[in-house]
Amino acid sequence: MKFQAVKGTRDFYPQEMRLRNWIMDAWRRVSLRNGFEEYDAPIFEYLDLFTAKSGPEIAEQLFSLTDRGGRNLAIRPEMTPALARMVNEKINSLPRPIKWFSVPRVCRAEAPQKGRLREFFQWNIDIIGEDGVIADAECIYVLVDLLRELGLTPNEVKVRIGSRAIAVAALNSYGVSDELVPTALGVMDKKSKVSPEDFIFMVRKAGLSEKQGALICHFIDCAMLPNRLEDLAKEPGIGVAVQDMQKLFGLLTAMGVADYCVVDLSIVRGLAYYTGIVYEVFDAGESLRAVAGGGRYDNLLQVLGGPKVGATGFGMGDVVLGILLQEKGKLPASLGSGQLDYFVADDAPELFEQVVSLVAAIRTKGKSADFSYKRQNVGKQLQTANRRGAKNAVIVKAGGQVAIKDLTTGQQQEMSMEAFLKSI
Amino acid sequence: MKFQAVKGTRDFYPQEMRLRNWIMDAWRRVSLRNGFEEYDAPIFEYLDLFTAKSGPEIAEQLFSLTDRGGRNLAIRPEMTPALARMVNEKINSLPRPIKWFSVPRVCRAEAPQKGRLREFFQWNIDIIGEDGVIADAECIYVLVDLLRELGLTPNEVKVRIGSRAIAVAALNSYGVSDELVPTALGVMDKKSKVSPEDFIFMVRKAGLSEKQGALICHFIDCAMLPNRLEDLAKEPGIGVAVQDMQKLFGLLTAMGVADYCVVDLSIVRGLAYYTGIVYEVFDAGESLRAVAGGGRYDNLLQVLGGPKVGATGFGMGDVVLGILLQEKGKLPASLGSGQLDYFVADDAPELFEQVVSLVAAIRTKGKSADFSYKRQNVGKQLQTANRRGAKNAVIVKAGGQVAIKDLTTGQQQEMSMEAFLKSI
């Protein structure tokens, strides 16, 4: 019998694990220095929690299961529903703003493709309880802080920032009725991913007129023009949303991250629950899927049974990020080497028990140490030390003496075992 | 609509998350200093992988699911099957001994009770490719290293060490046939958990004679006698297994952890796949479930389609460990306070943009910093700084000056913003 991992999932052998930890350590480090606190939720929830947020059609993208009591559960495909559930549960005792982060494993029952797996890790940054754009600005700052931390430059990645509020106001001004707005936003979101013919088909299917389709095209084509915001500000009903965007860019400038950010009003995000500022991170060539995406979602907590509380945040998966870092040559050359401080060898088999004691003594002092199980000559043992990337080799000799060899410089010195242990 | 977490799972709010991270950091730290490398596997596997190892009856203790292709999957209830699968896949390219650790989330469809949840984290330490007891000794050393790291003393916890090989040899000498040995081991394992009447019932049900039942009782009653190993050594067919145990204790003594260890031949472990040395960790009063358990499993890789390779290791869950640390008062008093290096306040609302810039500048230098989104008087802002457990408050004043206040000592000094940034 031969067993394999399920397609679309990954085995993390030590080498892949070191890379995963390197990315997740950066996520944690950046989150903490920006004043966010870590939380987590169970890997599975009641299915209802996901369908309440995203509609019943989400169910087929989920890995769902049934417990012994016959209850319908599902593995989490994202973190936001559990976040909203947890915050709602303690909404009256949590000091606001709530600044939380998480690095959950999530699973989606999708067909695996480049940059899209059925199991991955997703960094989540969320601020709950603050309506002002300062919270959106801070989320985007954290996002850029991470990109910068990993060595990605403003020429290599861009945060493309749009506004649901501006897009909705524009659609209203084109005569799109309120009921059609969600579908029209979906059409906008898909525009760049489909052919002109398919776009026209989508417009018709959404119940929009040809003229409205043309106006949406125009809106998207002008989405990145330098004076676009100023021009829009003159149109009726759109002023406040434009001011929010301008205020946001003022804050991003004060924070020193504006060089990573561009206005792109064609960004509206696919999911129904976004309400204000929205954004996605792409590599400059846009050859990959979005590295991260997020925005304001002021209604979600209420939809999930809580009060109306302002909320904003983003998610970043490890898969596309990993591909991007690899392609741009940003991965560290020697991940995890030098993890072993001392490799202890014996000069003769009868000294083995002393090796075992010395290794234990070194570890007790908080340093890492290892040794060969097989009794071999010193040369073979030192080969293992080198293969393991140990910083130092310690050779136990007769008469309680040890030789310490720095495996980087090759320098060697002898002393008593006692003196050596004291020196650690 | 109100949503709740599934029964038997846990929400990790920041406070609970800090405790979980504190335990998992200790697991990682101890693993690395003992020369183990981290690995991980997917959260779900093909159902067959689990039934091949543990028999079809395991299926009802699993959270199983079906993917869109109709394949039967299950969330992992433990790590060993995936470990064996991964090692088998690369058995010819992995240098031995393979010393790996993992800290996976695992799920079991059991009824929740004290110390037993349906989702928990489990530290796994395994050594593959070494047949000698040195590998068992090292696993037990790592286990004790962790207990010691968390402040648990030899008076509070004990590693109770038995031997499958000795137990099987004893059963053989009582005339128990090879086919009945697995069932008889199960009876032995359950002896301490059932009444004398239920034990007799179990003996009969297992197809053992009354005399064999009495001999098993005697074996268990004598399991911890000081000279038990020496006495057993004189019996035929049991010598090698006894020598292994004696060698093990010699190594544990050389490693300096023998004070945490006792011989307890009644420990045989429930699972079918153990072959040699086995052990469980209990609190001294044995008021809780086992904190950890493990042993040698030399046949498992072969059962899962690989070659016959010696393997030994243990698992430790976070739930019983957490309860024990709590009961013994070993949890740190102020987990995670002091995570925030600087809380930046403004002396007047018009200085807010300078606050935002200064916070970003501090974070760019790798220190953690935060600020109030609301414009409030300095007093209110400093209250927030204290609530957040910040180490220092920085008050931005007119004219590019800042006052730095050490929130532990109360000491305060003023300087230019430039000088302050240089000092970080």
Image: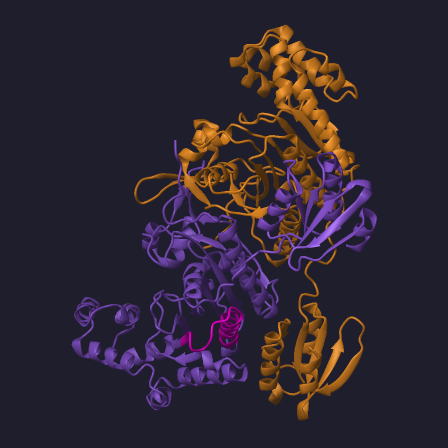
Chain colours: A purple, B orange
Q: Quadrant of residue B112?
A: top right
B311 to B30, vertically: above or below? above
Residue B99, x across and y down, in percent: 58, 42
Magenta-highlighted residues: A135-160
Residue toward you, A7 or A211: A7
* Residue A100 placement (x, y as % from top left): 56, 64
Quadrant into which the C terminus of chain B falls: bottom right
Q: In the current view of this chain or complex, which residue is farthest to the bottom?
A: B399
Above or below A415: residue A409: below
- Is residue A62 in sight in this rendering? yes
Residue A151 falls within the magenta-colored stretch: yes
Viewer-proximal residue among B270 and A90: B270
Whether residue A407 sits left or right of residue B38 in the image: it is right
Toward the viewer: B203 or A13? Answer: A13
Q: Position of residue B157 (x, y in %)?
A: 74, 37
The residue that appears at 76% across and 39% down in the rendered structure is: A354
Q: Is residue A306 visible?
A: no
In the image, is residue B24 part of the stretch drawn in magenta? Answer: no
Residue A295 screen position, x and y as percent? 43, 70
Exactly how many numbered labels are in the figure? 0
Residue under the image location 38 percent in, 67 percent down: A290
Depicted A10 relative to depicted A174: above or below: above
Is A88 situated above or below A399? below
Q: Quadrant of residue A73?
A: top left
Left or right: A345, with B209 as reference point: right
Quarter occupied by the N terminus of chain B: bottom left
Taking the image as shown, residue A335 lies to the left or right of residue A342, namely left
Residue B41 located left or right of residue B19: left
